[in-house]
Image (cartoon, rainbow, N blue to C red):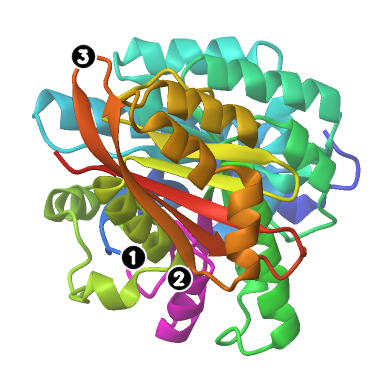
């Protein structure tokens, strides 16, 4: 035992030991909601100490003390077992289940056979691994980074989600976040001061969400308490929110009811108003792809192209990237013999460059293209000239649709 532990702390540790024996540590569940729809999609299990007389010992009182010894690991395992029992009960009663995150202290990263014990515990209840999320603090991730990277990778391979908790609360290692295979990033409440009115704060948060999305991490903002905070987080395309604005931590029975209700009680907002910019862009692209199954972006200056969609079209044997001239030759080869020269000359780099210099906004023709089924169909191909403020290259976006 740590020699720096006071007599008062020793007494509290004795009480914690007895409380563990009496199953006095139980999870309170704080729901996590979709920031756009208000749908309850997951939760975090928070340890609560309920004394025999019904009193509640504050986590602020017992967690720091427990973390000085291995008592914290015993509490974590007790909470995991309780969550597994809850999930098993929901499954047996055919109720809706959502993933629940369980906190694991940094001490677990040095615990022998942690991964084995995690699997054995969850498997003993016969519940799917994806209903349990392993939540590790940012500080735990910083210890012995190579071992943590391997451990997280193995846990993910076992079918568990892994969250980096309290991100932004300390001196974060962005390289570690890059290397580690966690799939959830929880933004610490300390970054949400006031109503996100500070320009520096907004810039920091926007940057965090930007790199998290690039790394394909599900983002959760903790400590959301005001509509103003929620509004800003939506502009960052934050996926989930957790905080008093929607729900406080609640006992098992209340959380079960919340799961069945699916949505936050007072949430009744128009998704067209509340959706983030990224969602708007996604909807627009969905509409574009519905009408134009083939969408190509090309750089005429560099004679290159990139195909962004190629579904339900006439012919499907074209590479997704390459040389633009070769793309046109390939396209011409699929046309009706009477249309091949028209297609080649119209969409040659030289002809498109001349049209651009004349100030044309687009170039469009209709040809007959041979489909994979051996049938010729009328196809409208339109090249729109577009600009990117970062370069002087001449760019085009090609939209193709079947007319038959």
Q: Quadrant of the N terminus?
A: top right
Q: Does residue 28 appear to the left or right of 18 in the view shown?
A: left
Give the spatial CA distance, label 1 vs label 2.
7 Å
Nearest to the observer: residue 380 or residue 311? 380
Residue drawn at point x = 67 percent, y = 49 percent: 300
Q: Does residue 392 appear to the left or right of 259 in the view shown?
A: right
Residue at mark 1 = 36
Residue 279 colored in magenta in the image: no
Q: Does residue 335 appear to the left or right of 69 in the view shown?
A: left
Q: Does residue 352 appear to the left or right of 383 in the view shown?
A: right
The outermost residue toward the left is 93
Count numbered badges in the picture.
3
Q: Quadrant of residue 60?
A: bottom right
Residue drawn at point x = 51 percent, y = 53 percent: 397
Nearest to the observer: residue 23 or residue 239? 239
The mark lying in front, picked from 3 and 1, is 3
Secondary structure beneath label 3: loop
Q: Residue 168 at what x, y percent from top left?
A: 72, 60
Residue at mark 3 = 373
Give the spatial CA distance, label 2 vs label 3.
45 Å
Q: Which residues are magenta?
A: 219-246
């Amino acid at each position: 035992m740590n020699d720096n532990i006071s007599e008062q702390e020793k007494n509290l540790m004795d009480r914690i030991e007895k409380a563990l024996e009496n199953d006095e540590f139980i999870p309170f569940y704080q729901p996590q909601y979709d920031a756009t729809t208000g749908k309850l999609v997951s939760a975090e299990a928070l340890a609560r100490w309920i004394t025999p007389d019904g009193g509640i010992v504050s986590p602020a009182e017992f967690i720091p003390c427990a973390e000085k010894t291995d008592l914290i690991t015993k509490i974590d395992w007790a909470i995991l077992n309780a969550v597994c029992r809850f999930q098993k009960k929901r499954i047996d009663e055919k109720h809706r289940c959502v993933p629940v995150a369980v906190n694991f202290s940094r001490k677990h990263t040095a615990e022998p056979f942690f991964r084995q014990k995690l699997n054995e515990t969850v498997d003993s209840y016969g519940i799917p691994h994806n209903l349990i999320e392993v939540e590790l603090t940012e500080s735990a991730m910083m210890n012995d980074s190579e071992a943590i990277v391997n451990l997280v990778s193995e846990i993910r391979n076992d079918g568990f989600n892994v969250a980096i908790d309290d991100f932004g609360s300390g001196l974060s290692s962005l390289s570690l976040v890059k290397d580690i295979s966690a799939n959830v990033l929880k933004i610490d409440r300390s970054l949400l001061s006031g109503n996100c009115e500070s320009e520096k704060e907004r810039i920091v948060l926007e940057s965090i969400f930007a790199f998290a999305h690039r790394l394909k991490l599900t983002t959760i903002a903790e400590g959301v308490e005001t509509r103003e905070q929620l509004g800003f987080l939506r502009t960052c395309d934050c996926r989930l929110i957790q905080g008093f604005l929607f729900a406080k931590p609640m006992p098992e029975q209340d959380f079960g009811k919340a799961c069945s209700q699916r949505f936050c009680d007072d949430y009744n907002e128009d998704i067209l108003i509340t959706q983030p910019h990224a969602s708007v862009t996604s909807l627009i692209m969905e509409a574009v792809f519905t009408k134009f199954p083939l969408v190509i972006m090309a750089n005429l200056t560099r004679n290159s192209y990139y195909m962004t969609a190629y579904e339900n079209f006439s012919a499907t044997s074209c590479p997704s990237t390459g040389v633009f001239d070769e793309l046109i030759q390939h396209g011409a080869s699929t046309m009706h013999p009477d249309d091949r020269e028209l297609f080649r000359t119209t969409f040659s780099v030289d002809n498109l460059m001349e049209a651009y210099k004349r100030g044309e906004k687009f170039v469009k023709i209709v040809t007959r293209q041979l489909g994979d089924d051996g049938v010729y169909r009328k196809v409208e191909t339109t090249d729109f000239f577009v600009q990117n403020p970062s370069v002087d290259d001449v760019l085009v976006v090609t939209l193709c649709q079947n007319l038959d």
